[in-house]
Structures are given as structure tokens and as C-alpha cells.
Image (cartoon, grey):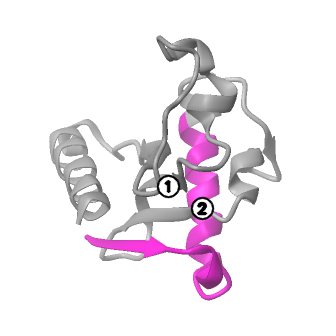
Amino acid sequence: MQILAVRATAFGEFADLIDSMHRLRARVFRDRLNWDVEVRNGLETDEYDQLDPTYILAVSSAGAVAGCARLLPAMGPTMLANTFPQLLSSRSLEVHACMVESSRFCVRPPPAPNHTARVLNTTPRTTFLRIHA
């Protein structure tokens, strides 16, 4: 498993992985969780993907995106402050320059039941370790 932090300036270099990430998000958020998300041509995106996020990608040894998360500076628009402000007790988010929001975290569903424990235990832990590194 390889963990990549892909900044907006490198999206072109990692276009295939970014595309796979958006397809994974469609599978997880729309198909599996039945969320009301926008999916076009099999790709799940929202307005926050237009804000030059950094994507954290967990990539398997076979080159498949196994998990992902989106990071945005908390100083700008975020899902918490702009889409879900009702989740904030004060209805506003006090931010500083060192804060980031992690959103659209998902893990590829396991291919078979016997792989569940390994995929669900390894991918999120590895991905979050990279975010905090």
C-alpha cells in the first residue's frame, strides 16, 4: 500500500488516480450509502473539489485506489462551515491557518468477505497516518 498526497498542482500527473478516486467515491457514497450526491459519467464530485484540495490516496500494489480523503484549508469554504453548520454548537467555525478539513473519506469495499478485516483495518489507519505525518 502506498499513500500519496496529491496537491492541485499535480492533478495532471496523477489524472488516472484522481479519476479512480472520483469513481470510488461514486461507488461508496451513491451506490453503497445511497447519499444524494452528484455523479456525472461515473464520477462523484462537488463544489469543494473545485477549491484546489489536496487528496490523500491509498493506492494498492496493483495500482488501484483503495481509499481516499480530501483535505481543504479550514480558512476557506469547508463542508462543515458551509454545508453542515448545524453540526457546530456555536453555528460558526473558529479557524486558524494550521487547520484543515478532511472530507470525502472512503475506503474501497472489499472484494470478498474474507478480505474485510484486512482492508478495513489497514487502509484507514495507513491513510490517517499519512494525513497526520
* Residue at x 67%, y 65% (from the top left corner): 52
* Residue at x 40%, y 57% (from the top left corner): 98
Give yes or no for contact between labels 2 and 1 (Cβ–Cβ under 8 Å): yes
Query: Residue beneath label 2, please?
Result: 53
The one nearer the camera, 43 or 48, is 48
Q: What is the crowding at mark 2: few (fewer than 14 residues within 10 Å), some, or many (at least 20)?
A: some
* Residue at x 50%, y 17% (from the top left corner): 88
Q: Main secondary structure of the magenta part?
A: helix
Question: Residue 105, how many percent across, how many down?
Answer: 45, 44
Q: Earlier in the sequence, mark 2 or mark 1?
A: 2
* Residue at x 56%, y 59% (from the top left corner): 21
* Amino acid of disc 1: Leu
Based on the picture, tell me whether residue 51 belongs to the magenta stretch.
Answer: no
Quarter of the figure that contains the N terminus: bottom left
Q: Quadrant of residue 63?
A: bottom left
Query: Residue beneath label 1, please?
Result: 71
Quarter of the figure that contains the C terminus: bottom left
Q: Is residue 65 left or right of residue 91?
A: left
Question: Residue 129, how many percent across, how many down?
Answer: 21, 58
The magenta region covers 1-28
Residue 105 visible? The answer is yes
* Amino acid of disc 2: Pro
Q: Is residue 85 left or right of residue 90?
A: right
For this orientation, the residue located farthest to the bottom is 13
